[in-house]
Image (spheres, rainbow, N blue to C red):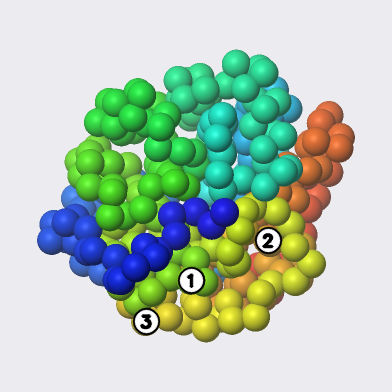
């Protein structure tokens, strides 16, 4: 299932948040010091592209996640996505679903994930973003989550099952707190949806490379460059591509057309196969870093 697909009938209604400001006008004052916003702006100014690895918080266990973040940073990650496990992860493929089950078995949930971020902030200032599902935020309280997230040191939030048309509360609370929002676009997205996502995204725009769920693919889909160009024609917000990227050659291709590459399932699968070999994950991230730098040059 594609996350937050376009409405089946007619153009999607414009989110009311578009009246409060758009990404093209730059981040709000509360976001000016946001690590994710600043990191992406710095990369753009330097003519470089972002590498954003994804891992599931709590997989293979919480202490390993803390160590793994250090490995990813040392290997060249510009920001890190932390998945927060949920019982009905509609955007996750089999690899990430199994990682979520392992994390849940270790007691990982939204509050423990925020505690994990607090501990990580004692070690690193790398931008950190959660990728999760809206039910967890609703149960915590959307405003309370945004405030608690920023207090813990979180920089961004990606909610895979929340379209911008339904995201007014999260967008408003996040902007007030200084938490960057990231919404998703897919190959099926209309021009109206692109405008809505651009207005709602203050961190980056997450370009889903293909319809379906997460998972490594052999090749990038045809039409990806055209999709990224369509998004960039509508917005100055950084565009990062994810879903299906797992090899250096693919990351190199993405760096030629977008502002960053998001790599998840390939890393999560390595952890599943050999959970004690964090160095193996680091080696792939270093290769991805080199490829992205070559592609973005």
* Nearer-the-camera pick, 8 or 255: 8
Alpha carbon separation for disc pair 1 and 3 = 16 Å
The residue identified by callout 1 is: 188
Q: Secondary structure at mark 3?
A: helix
Tags 1 and 3 in contact by the CB under 8 Å rule? no
Task: Tell us which disc is closer to us: 2 or 1.
Answer: 1
Question: Mark number for residue 3?
Answer: none
Position of 96 with respect to 11 (left or right) is right
On-image quarter of the C terminus: bottom right
148 above or below 14?
above
Where is residue 5, by image quadrant?
bottom left
- Residue name at image x 60 percent, y 16 percent: 107
Q: Residue furthest left?
A: 19
Point out residue 155 in the picture as x, y percentages from the top left corner: 40, 41
Determine the secondary structure under disc 1: loop
Residue occupying image coordinates x 69% and y 72%: 220
Q: Residue at x 37, y 31 (%)?
A: 137
Identify residue for label 2: 244
Mark 3 sits on what residue? 233
Residue 7, image quadrant: bottom left
């Amino acid at each position: 299932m594609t996350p937050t697909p376009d409405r089946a009938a007619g153009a999607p209604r414009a989110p009311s948040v578009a009246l409060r400001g758009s990404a093209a006008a730059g981040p709000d004052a509360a976001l000016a010091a946001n690590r994710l916003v600043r990191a992406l702006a710095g990369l753009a100014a330097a003519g470089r592209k972002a590498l954003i690895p994804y891992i599931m918080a709590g997989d293979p266990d919480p202490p390993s996640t803390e160590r793994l973040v250090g490995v990813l940073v040392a290997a060249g990650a510009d920001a890190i996505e932390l998945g927060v496990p949920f019982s009905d992860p509609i955007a996750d493929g089999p690899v990430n679903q199994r990682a979520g089950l392992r994390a849940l078995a270790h007691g990982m949930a939204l509050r423990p994930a925020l505690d994990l971020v607090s501990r990580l902030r004692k070690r690193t200032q790398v931008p950190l973003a959660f990728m999760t599902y809206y039910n967890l935020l609703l149960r915590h309280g959307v405003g309370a989550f945004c405030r608690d997230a920023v207090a813990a040191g979180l920089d961004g939030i990606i909610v895979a099952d929340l379209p911008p048309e339904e995201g007014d509360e999260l967008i408003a609370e996040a902007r007030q707190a200084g938490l960057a929002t990231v919404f998703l676009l897919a190959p099926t997205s209309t021009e109206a949806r692109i405008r809505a996502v651009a207005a709602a995204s203050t961190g980056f725009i997450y370009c889903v490379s293909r319809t379906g769920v997460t998972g490594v693919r052999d090749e990038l889909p045809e039409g990806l460059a055209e999709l990224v160009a369509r998004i960039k024609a509508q917005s100055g917000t950084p565009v990062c591509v994810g879903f299906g990227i797992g090899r250096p050659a693919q990351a190199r291709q993405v760096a030629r057309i977008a502002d960053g590459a998001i790599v998840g399932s390939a890393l999560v699968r390595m952890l599943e196969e050999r959970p004690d070999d964090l160095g193996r994950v680091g080696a792939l991230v270093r290769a991805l870093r080199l490829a992205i730098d070559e592609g973005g040059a």
